Amino acid sequence: MSLFLNVANVFKQYEGKSILQNCSYDFKEVGIYGLIGPNGGGKSTFLRICSLLESPDRGAVTYTSEGRAVSPDLALKRRITMVQPKVGVFNTSVFRNVAYGLKIRGVPSRLIKEKVLGALDHVGLPHKKDQNALTLSSGETQRLGLARALVVEPEVLFLDEPTASIDPQNTAVIEEIIRKLKREARTLIVMATHDMEQVQRITDRVLRMEQGRISG
């Protein structure tokens, strides 16, 4: 059972400045959507609104499953995950950082270890499980952010500049994680990036954000 997303005529302003203007798009297929556009052009705002972290000033964000609208409640929010450009981590082990999302969802302790180790293996960090998360490199921290997202098995995943300011080796690892997630989990993934070559390498569809609107 997959989640799909329709964004209709969304407007958003900050301090009187229009960020999104009549922004609409229908994400009606599972796959990787690459969202490109200039810095400050509204990509991050769009992702936060789609992930229900912010509300639009006008317009609608509607999730559907099996052709029916899904109520925007806590249960829906737990089916959606967003990885921010700068991953914030807790001053504790990598394992505990990844386990946090499962604990607040009430996952039984006997399953948490299995799921966390699986997620860390997925992102290539099983050997770091006991290390303090604050000591990871920037690339490893970004992979930790992905592990925290993957461990809760989201049906829709938003990625905001997932490889910004990290080295080519970690970039390649993260790109392969994203590809594998689409293949194995059939997740709807929306990735904002400024890297056109990256979009061409890993996405199924390219969307362009210009003047607060999406085309593509």
Image (cartoon, helix red, strand yellow):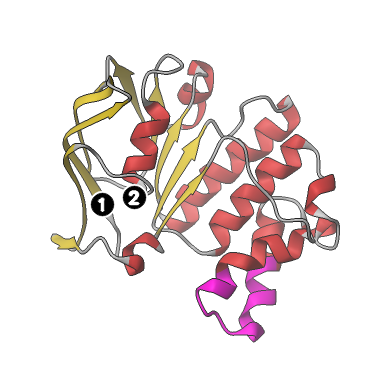
Q: Is residue 145 above or below residue 201?
A: below
Of the residues shown, which amino acid type is indicated by label 2? Leu
- Left or right, 105 with respect to 77, comes to right
x 34%, y 44%: residue: 54
**Residue 167, located in which quarter of the rendered image?**
top right
Magenta-colored segment: predominant secondary structure:
helix
What mark, if any, has residue 4 been given in the picture?
A: 1
Q: Secondary structure at mark 2?
A: loop
x 72%, y 34%: residue: 170
Give how far apart the Cα atoms at labels 1 and 2 are. Answer: 14 Å
Point out the tag, 1 or 2, that comes first from the N-terminus.
Answer: 1
- Left or right, 131 with respect to 209, comes to right
- The reply to whether the magenta stretch includes residue 112 is yes
The residue closer to the viewer here, 15 or 193, is 15
Figure quadrant of the N terminus: bottom left
Q: Return the x and y of residue 115 as percentages of the image width and height.
A: 63, 71
- The reply to whether the magenta stretch includes residue 84 is no
Q: Return the x and y of residue 131 as percentages of the image width and height.
A: 86, 57
x 77%, y 56%: residue: 91
**Residue 99, located in which quarter of the rendered image?**
bottom right
Residue picked out by circle 2 = 52
Residue 180 in view of the camera: yes
Nearer to us of marks 1 and 2 is 2
Q: Return the x and y of residue 69 as percentages of the image width and height.
A: 15, 60
The residue closer to the viewer here, 51 or 179, is 51
Q: Is residue 14 above or below residue 64?
A: above
Q: Return the x and y of residue 171 as percentages of the image width and height.
A: 66, 31
Q: Is residue 102 above or below residue 70?
A: below
Give the magenta part as a residue range: 102-116
